[in-house]
Amino acid sequence: MEPTHSVRGTVSDENNNLLPGAMVVVKGNTRKNTTTDINGAFVLEDVPANATLTISFMGYQSLDYPLEGRTAVRVSLTPEVMKLDDVIITGYQTLNRERATGSFGTITGKNMESKLQPNLS
């Protein structure tokens, strides 16, 4: 049986901003997983010394990180560049233009100028 140990680490972005809520999974064993806390930190118990961690976070490229016996890791994720075509926000959900059916209106700043009448007196 392969020796196991605890793995501690932090997950941040390319600007060293910590990423709370990032998913950390032992590759090949989805039962061994956790999410980072508010400080971007995580702890995984009973991880094989030669395991690979898969780290993912919404809007960032997933990363496979081989432990190679390490028990403390610091991971930096790279933003995922996505092409956003037309996105429609309905108030309840966000849809691609191709999926949207029905009637939609567009509100611009010019439309709002006549509506904004702050009264500070």
Image (cartoon, helix red, strand yellow):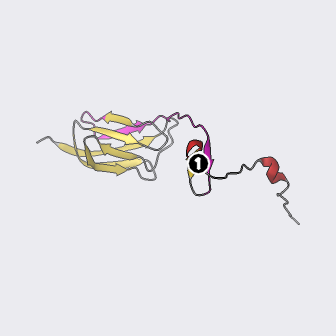
Magenta span: helix, strand or loop, mainly?
loop
**Does 40 sit above or below residue 16?**
below
Q: How far across and how far down the image is residue 42, in percent?
A: 36, 48
**In the rendered view, does 76 fall on the left or right side of 121?**
left
Q: How far across and how far down the image is residue 114, in percent?
A: 85, 55
**In the rendered view, does 85 fall on the left or right side of 14?**
right
**In the rendered view, does 99 fall on the left or right side of 28?**
right
Q: Quadrant of residue 51?
A: top left
Residue span colored magenta: 66-91
Which one is in front, 57 or 42?
A: 57
Examine the structure image and report whether residue 89 is included in the region drawn in magenta: yes
Q: How many discs appear?
A: 1
**Does 91 sit above or below residue 82?**
below
Label 1's element?
Answer: loop
Q: Which residue is mark 1?
A: 100
Which one is in front, 89 or 6?
A: 89
Taking the spot 62% from the left edge, 54% from the top edge, the residue there is: 90
